[in-house]
Amino acid sequence: MSNAFIGALEKKTESEWLSAIGSLLPEIHEVDRNAVQIWFRFYPLDLVNYLESSENVEEAMKGLAMDGDFGVVDKIDTSHRFLYGHRYWPQVKEVISKRAETIDGIGELVAEIKTVTHLAAIKAKTAEPLITAIAAIGVMTLVQVGLDEFKKAPGITERPQGIMAKSPEAIVAERAKDDSQGLFGFLKTIDKKFSVAFKAYSFDGTFPIINDEEIASASQKDRTRDWQSLDYRCWEGPVPIECTSASCGTCWVGVVGGQEKLSDPSPRERRAMKIFGYNQPETEKPFLRLACQARASGNVHLVIAPWNAVFGKKVRGNVEEVELEPVTTSAKALRETITTAVSGKE
C-alpha cells in the first residue's frame, strides 16, 4: 500500500537521508548519536533499492558476495534494539502509522522527523532528544517495508537489561569508563587489559582484550559459547571473521562507545571500506570499523553487523576496479565471488 505521504518519502535518496540525520545530530541525545548513524549504515537505502530493482534478488545478493541476514522487513520491531530509544518504539510506530494514513505529503525530511519526534515524545512523556533517533529510524523503516508490513508488526519492545536499563547519562558515562588496572595499574604498559562489550542481533556479551590488540583477534579467543550456533558466520568468537586482513568485509562493526580508544584507520582499511560499500565516515576516529584492523587501548562498546557484502562498485559506484587480497584458505574460496562484486560485472 502506497499513498502521497509514502510516495514523497520514497523520492528521498540515501544521501538526503544521511544529510538529514547529520542535521539532526545536535538534537539527538549522546546516548543514541552514534547508534542512529550506525543503523542507517546497517540498513542502507541504496542497497535496498538495488536489490528490489533486480530481476533475481537471490542472484543479485550472490553477485555482491552477501552473507548473513540482510534487511529490515523481518526486523521492524527489533532492528533498533541497540538504541536507548528502542523503548519508545510503540509510541513512534503509532505516530508514523497514523501520519502515513492521514497526511497527504511531506515537506522537508528533517521537518517530518521532528514532527514525529514531537508527537511521539508527548505520547511517551519523555524528552524529544531521546526520541529523535528512533523517530528517524521509524520513518526509514516505513520506506523500506511499506505501510502494510509496517502496520502488521506488533510494535513490541524488549525490556531494557544490563547497561541499557540505566539512565541515558549513566549509559554514556559507563561507555566512557575503562577497566581498572589495579593498584599499580599506572605502571603497566603492554599488559593492560580491557573489555569489549558487544551487541549482535540475537546475542550480546563481553570479551577481554589486551592493550593494542585487534578486536577480531581478541574475539577469536572467546570460547565461552558456541557462537556459530547463534550466527553461522562466527567461526571463532562473537565477531564474524573470515580473512583477518581487510579483504572480505565480514568483521565490520559499529562503535557506540569508545571510538576514540581505537587506532586510526589505516589507508588499507579506508580503501577496503569503500570497496565493501559500508560508507565509513572520513573522520579521524569513525564509528564504523573493521574489527580485524581496529586496535583497542581501552574499553569499547560495539554493535555487530548482521550481514556483510561487497557492493561499493555495483551500488555506490565509488571505487575503481581493484582486487581484494584474501590470504587465508577460507578467504581464498571467496576470491572469485568477491572479485566479481568489486569489478561490477554480472
Image (spheres, helix red, strand yellow):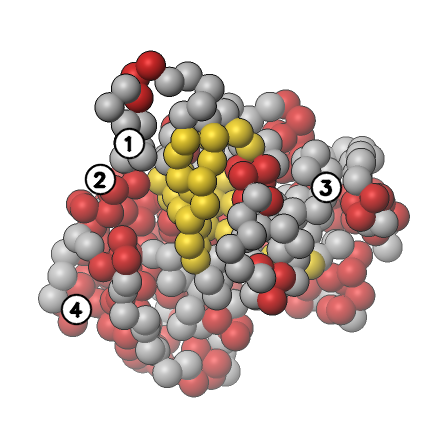
Which residue lies under the disc numbered 4?
124
Mark 2 or mark 1, whichever is nearer to me: 1
From mark 4 to mark 1, how far is it between C-alphas? 38 Å
Give the amino acid at mark 1. Answer: Ser
Mark 3 or mark 4, whichever is nearer to me: 3
Give the amino acid at mark 3. Answer: Cys
Give the amino acid at mark 2. Answer: Ala
Asked which secondary structure carries label 2, the reply is helix
Query: Is residue 6 in view?
Result: no
Q: Looking at the image, is mark 1 or mark 3 earlier in the sequence?
A: 1
Labels 3 & 4 near each other (Cβ < 8 A): no
From mark 2 to mark 3, how far is it between C-alphas? 34 Å
Asked which secondary structure carries label 1, the reply is loop
Labels 1 & 3 near each other (Cβ < 8 A): no
Asked which secondary structure carries label 4, the reply is helix
Q: Looking at the image, is mark 4 or mark 1 earlier in the sequence?
A: 4
Provide residue 309's location: percent of width, then percent of height.
Answer: 68, 52
**Identity of the residue drawn at 33% across and 14% down:** 187
Q: In this view, does 16 lie to the left or right of 162?
A: right
Which residue lies under the disc numbered 2?
173
In the rendering, which numbered label is found on residue 180? 1
Crowd around label 2: few <14 · some 14–19 · many ≥20 (10 Å): few
**Identity of the residue drawn at 23% across and 59% down:** 165
Which residue lies under the disc numbered 3?
243
Mark 1 or mark 3, whichever is nearer to me: 1
